[in-house]
Amino acid sequence: MPTAPTFYVRCNHFLSLAVDENGQPCRFMVKASTENEALTQMSQHVQKVHKQNPKDLMNNIKACIHQTGTKTFGTRGVGSGHH
């Protein structure tokens, strides 16, 4: 039985200069079972930690949500550097 996909999003993918509570580059990452859950959790993080209105960043957050297990293999053309 295949495992359920995991949706993930990293804070520093759409807030490149964001820093955490210690002044270090923010490395917060959400892993969720649905895209909406990932969006909700990241919105809460952005609001609480970075004091940003998540509504202003909604399109950026959505664009950075990825799903595990969706990478396509065997798509490189002939002569792509693997000999």
Image (cartoon, grey):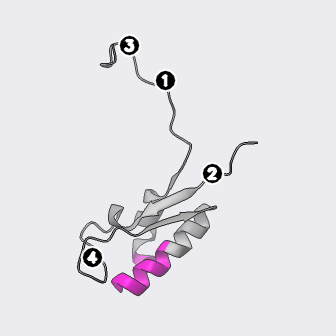
Write the residue at 40% across / 18% down.
77
Q: Earlier in the sequence, mark 3 or mark 2?
A: 2
Disc 1 to disc 2: CB gap under 8 Å: no
Q: Residue 80, located in which quarter of the rendered image?
A: top left
Q: CA distance from mark 3 to mark 2?
A: 31 Å
Q: CA distance from mark 4 to mark 3?
A: 43 Å
Please give the label number shown on residue 74: 1
Q: Earlier in the sequence, mark 4 or mark 3?
A: 4
Q: Is residue 22 left or right of residue 31?
A: left
Q: Residue 82, located in which quarter of the rendered image?
A: top left
For label 3, count other residues whose C-alpha is less than 10 Å away and answer few (under 14), some (14-19) or many (20+): few
Q: Nearer the viewer, mark 4 or mark 3?
A: 4
Q: CA distance from mark 1 to mark 2?
A: 21 Å
Q: Earlier in the sequence, mark 1 or mark 2?
A: 2
Q: Residue type at mark 3: give it.
A: Val
Disc 3 to disc 2: CB gap under 8 Å: no
Q: Secondary structure at mark 2?
A: loop
The boundaries of the magenta stretch are 42-56
Disc 4 to disc 1: CB gap under 8 Å: no
Residue bearing the label numbered 4:
19
Q: Secondary structure at mark 3?
A: loop
Q: Residue type at mark 4: give it.
A: Val
Q: Secondary structure at mark 4?
A: loop
Q: Which one is nearer the viewer's eye here, 54 or 80?
A: 80
Q: Nearer the viewer, mark 3 or mark 2?
A: 2
